[in-house]
Image (cartoon, rainbow, N blue to C red):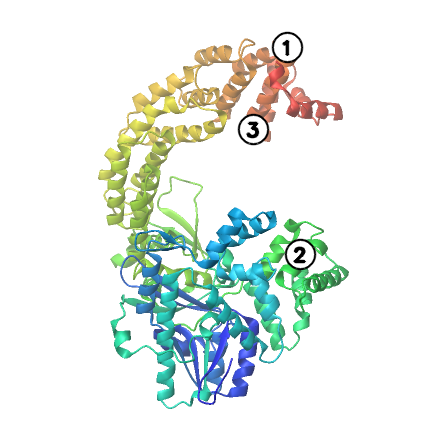
Amino acid sequence: MKHTEKSPHFFGVRHLSPQGAHQLLKFLDEIMPTAVLVEGLSDANPQIEHFTGKATKPPVAILAYTEELPVRTLLYPFAEYSPEYQAFVWSKKNNAHAEFIDLPSDVFINLEYSNKDRDKTDGTVKSGDGETIESKEEADLNKIEKGSDSESEAVYATTIKNKSVYEKWALMAGDDDHDTYWERNFEHNLNKDAYRLAVFEFGKSIRQLSHDNRFEEAKNLVREAYMRKRIQDTIKSGHKPEKVVVVTGAYHSTALGGDLPPMTDEEFSSLPRVKTKLTLMPYSYYRLSSRSGYGAGNTAPAYYGMMWECLREKDFEKLPSEYFSSMVSYLRESGTHRSVAEVIEAVRLSNTLAAMHGGSAPTLKDLRDAAVICLGYGELTVVAEAMAHVEVGTAIGSLPEGVSRTSIQDDFYRELKRLKLEKYKSPVAMDLELDLRENRRVKSEEAAFLDLNRSCFLHRLKALNISFQKYKPKSQDSATWAESWILKWTPEAEIELVESVLRGETVELAVAFAFKERLEKCEKIEEAALVIRQACECGMMESMEYAREVLQRLAVDTGAFNEAAFAAFQLSQVISYGDIRKFDSSKLVPLLEQLFLRSTLLMLDAANCDNTAAAGVAESINILNTIALEYYNIVDEELWIRKLTELSERDDKNPKLSGFACSILLERNLMDSEKLSQEVARRLSPGIDADLGAGWFEGLSMRNRYVLLARTSLWNQISEYVSQLDNEQFKRALVFLRRAFADFNTAEKRGICEKLGEVWGVDSEDASDLLSRELSEEEEQSISELNDFDFGDI
């Protein structure tokens, strides 16, 4: 790469590169430029002062988003070791002019998403008639894959064909992935100016290979023409070319100099645009990592932060020992001890692995492999959590209060003040108890309904998944006027709040948009019913009405028992709020009646299921029975009892559910002892398969076990049933009866033992002590053999 006295300096980087930042600072100290130009949204220049301020703690990110739907976004995250961030810090320290020089967000977003919306989502390029155009490289690989006599060549072609150009380059260089290739060849290169020169050649090679996507290539040409314009404008403003340093990605570093023309003012004015807004937001290492889905070219931000610290301390060789020591510290805190000797062995192994690959220092892949062998004893699961902690980290950035607030942040802080919740914006978790009833001891309406308004606000934040609050369900479900919350503020919550601006300018508008999105995609009545409840809790009656209309439409065709029961439950909860939340629930009553009727009629068909599905059906039956008890004047309780009785008597339905229906009828005093005895005699007899009888009893014992314990005749019949079984039938029955009694607590089991003592005519306490004693070794063995019992032999 040639540089003349009349041309700017171009420094290519990877956007999150510790070595790039380290070498860039050395280069800037050597050149001492008067202007530093950085690839990035040019309308973000007013933000430079904020994210280089002393009170700013990286990572931070620039977020650009469109004002109108559909919301389109661009995100530019920066860590402390980002070369771009360090370029601005250096410029501020040395009084040099600094600015972003890429397209402004209103042009960039339109250009970015115009390309994405084309008919090339698979990355291919199509001709005018829609036929796919292959690149020369793609065509060559297809020929190798289809026609090669060498199996290894065909496998290689198949492996590399669908990779990105960066992954292809790494594979051709002999590395498994681009991150490893980059780290080995660029991050570990400490020689003066080697990074800049190597990146320039790398960028030039990548450009030669990147011709598969013509639209992406065209977009980059437009961006580069605009960046050349900004470089020329900077020179025209009085900066000497040789005192200008341009910091860009490796791909662009080769195209900004030379004889290519800059974009003209007329060309720039003609570019299509879309209205956008831009803000600065705190970020986190987790969101910076590819594990969160954000990518940003960095799979291990904390590891690269560790590398940056080693470079700053001019002790790069200590990186492996820092990595393993940090991992061992985490393991020790988790209760897994590892010695210093094992750390030393891990360092030695990682250096050996690096040497085997021709590297000068271990890559992250080498360190991981050594950690698994030396610290995990060959098991990744032993060190996986520690590895994630050391590589991804938990660092969260922060910005000075008031810096570049979005409209939703302003609204959030206004609501905190209005609702007297400012003291809860603390890193220490605090409890908040709310009483939603009107406070008649205060004068103003605002004060009278303060807790109700607080509840609506906190539920809105909950709907947006903002982690400022955590709802604590009450054990007393009937107390609809009481709520408990835990409030704790973290920078992560600030990030979530900023991101919510993509849905609306205020918290309320963002929640309304979130509900609308869910309802537009909604295909199940249970989801629509859940939105009704959440909208009610948020105090958003328009969203609740829209959800009611969606539910009404979906309820016409629903045939799923569990979904209909769940939807009915959600409606019953909303109606139970009554006047507490100050809304008219009359429109929901007919819908509850309709869903309850539909669920009741679907119950018998739903009971024709296996034991796996029976658990969910039993839960739904329980829900419907609760609704029937609470809203007997609204729903058809008579039909419910009739269907419940029919299920309890049916032999062709799941026996557990038939038993469960019996238990409900017993609890409601709708089945007398004589009827129960008839059912027990019919269900628990040697002529009935043991698994069917025991399954029925399991269902019977799922509710109000004290009702069962009080009925001596029941235990008399069970004792008689067991005594009539032969050895093989007894083994089979015992397997299922053990499951039936598994959920009984100690007091209930003791009560059963005493009841059986009465049946057998022995002292109740003696029987209880005898049956409750610990099993002998021989008895334990007999019980364990039941786990291997082969029912097919009976």
- Amino acid under disc 2: Asp
For the residues labelled 2 and 3, say whether their Cβ atoms are less than 8 Å apart.
Answer: no
Q: Position of residue 396 (x, y in %)?
A: 50, 65
Q: Is residue 341 above or below residue 603?
A: below
Give the farthest residue toward the right: 341
Secondary element at image label 2: helix
Instruction: Determine the CA span between mark 2 and mark 3.
Output: 49 Å
Instruction: Determine the CA span between mark 1 and mark 2.
Output: 59 Å
Q: Which corner quadrant holds the C terminus?
A: top right
Q: In this rendering, which labeled residue sits more in front, label 2 or label 3?
A: 2
The circle on residue 369 is: 2
- Amino acid under disc 1: Asp
- Check disc 1: other Cα within 10 Å, few if <14, some if 14-19, many if 20+: few
Q: Position of residue 754 (x, y in %)?
A: 61, 21
Q: Is residue 330 left or right of residue 30?
A: right
Q: Position of residue 653 (x, y in %)?
A: 43, 18
Q: Position of residue 629 (x, y in %)?
A: 34, 29
Secondary element at image label 3: loop
For the residues labelled 1 and 2, say whether their Cβ atoms are less than 8 Å apart.
Answer: no
The residue at 62%/71% (across/down) is 188
Q: In this rendering, which labeled residue sits more in front, label 1 or label 2?
A: 2
Q: Is residue 112 left or right of residue 169?
A: left
For disc 1, the marked residue is 726
Q: Is residue 273 left or right of residue 752?
A: left
Image quarter of residue 222:
bottom left
Instruction: Determine the CA span between mark 1 and mark 3.
Output: 26 Å
For disc 3, the marked residue is 744
Closer-to-camera residue (299/599): 299
Closer-to-camera residue (156/595): 156
Closer-to-camera residue (747/512): 512
Q: Is residue 21 above or below residue 176?
A: below
